[in-house]
Amino acid sequence: MLHIAPGDPVVTVVGPTAPKQAYEAAREKLGLDKPIYYQYFKWLSRAAVGDFGRSVALRKSVNSVIAERLPITLQFTSLGILLMYLIGVPVGILSAVKRYSLVDYTLMGVVFIAVSMPSFWLGLILLLIFGVHLGWVPVSGYGTFGLTILPALALAARGAALSARVTRSSMLEVINQDYIRTARAKGLVERVVHYKHALRNALIPVVTLFGMRLGWAVAAGVSLEIVFNRPGVGRLLINSIFARDYSVVQATILVLSVSIMLGNLLADVIYTVVDPRIRYD
């Protein structure tokens, strides 16, 4: 699709006013004179051994470019994922325990609002309030906690709302099981019933959501890096698309795809920790 789109990476190399011979020489040197399928399989054979080629726009290896940008992205996405569950799971538990009460309706109302807000829009609102009006944090950059917490909150809001809804639904289903009624009949206090007996079995859908949200968080970080002007993988991807830097685009998308696969793999591993009945032989 990127090859079909208008634009030519050769212009980045030789400039817009270079003679035709320079264009042809640069195209041959970059291998762009070959068919698309040949270019793809050549890139794939190199990527299989960890060589993602060289960036046309940045004039350096793609491996080093991604190695520089990836920690910047992971800095706020990892904090955002942590906040998703530190906020969402307790809210879901409290809402389930206080079901059909004013607390439940209030929390689910806030959750409904949070799940409806796009991450980039919330990021702009947070920048406007805390960066422009209050002046508590700079409006762009990276490195400090103040510059990390705002994009992390913008990223976490929707994920926290979804995890709260899933936790509430799962807890309500588990609370009505026979073994929970048996635990209450033994005289156990409600706190023990909820957190020791019900919560662990209710976490399976939450863990499944974690596997999906891990890949989503990295992908959602693309728009947030534009909003907060962070030079991470997301901004690198957007800039490379505009520059028709094929090698960087392909490598960046591969990194995003692998993050989704790792998220699902990690979820499978956590299943065995949460529920001892699940074993992979």
Image (tube, grey):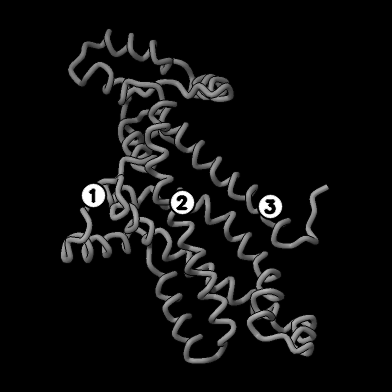
* Mark toward the start of the polypeptide (2 vs 3): 2
Q: The residue under label 2 is which amino acid type?
A: Ser
- Residue 71 screen position, x and y as percent: 41, 40
Image quadrant holding the N terminus, namely top left
143 relative to 203 in the view: left or right:
left
Q: Position of residue 146 (x, y in %)?
A: 29, 55
Tag 2 and tag 3, C-beta contact below 8 Å: no
Which residue lies under the disc numbered 1? 140
Q: Compare marks 2 and 1 and give the one earlier in the sequence.
A: 2
Specify which label sits upstream in the sequence, 1 or 3: 1
Compared with 13, 161 (above or below) is: below
In space, the residues marked 2 and 1 are separated at their CA atoms by 19 Å
Which residue shows up at 18% across the image and 17% down it? 17
Tag 3 residue: 268
- What SS does tag 3 mark? helix
Three-letter amino acid code at the position of disc 1: Ser
User: Quick check: 242 above or below 85?
Assistant: above
Per the image, the residue denoted by label 2 is: 78
The image shows residue 171 at horizontal and vertical percentages of 64, 77
The relative height of residue 193 versus residue 256 in the rendered view (above or below) is: below
Q: Which quadrant of the figure has residue 24?
A: top left
Task: Find the distance from the CA under tag 2 to the CA under tag 3.
Answer: 19 Å
Residue 247 x, y percent position in the rendering = 43, 27
Q: Where is 225 relative to 4, above or below? A: below
Rendered residue at 31%/40% (across/down): 231
Q: Is disc 2 surrounded by few (<14), some (14 to 19) or many (20+) residues within 10 Å?
A: some
User: What amino acid is at disc 3?
Assistant: Asp
Q: Residues within 10 Å of mark 1 (few under 14, many from 20)?
A: some
Q: Image point 64% across, 53% down: which residue? A: 267
Q: Nearer the viewer, residue 29 or 254?
A: 254
Q: State the SS at label 1.
A: loop
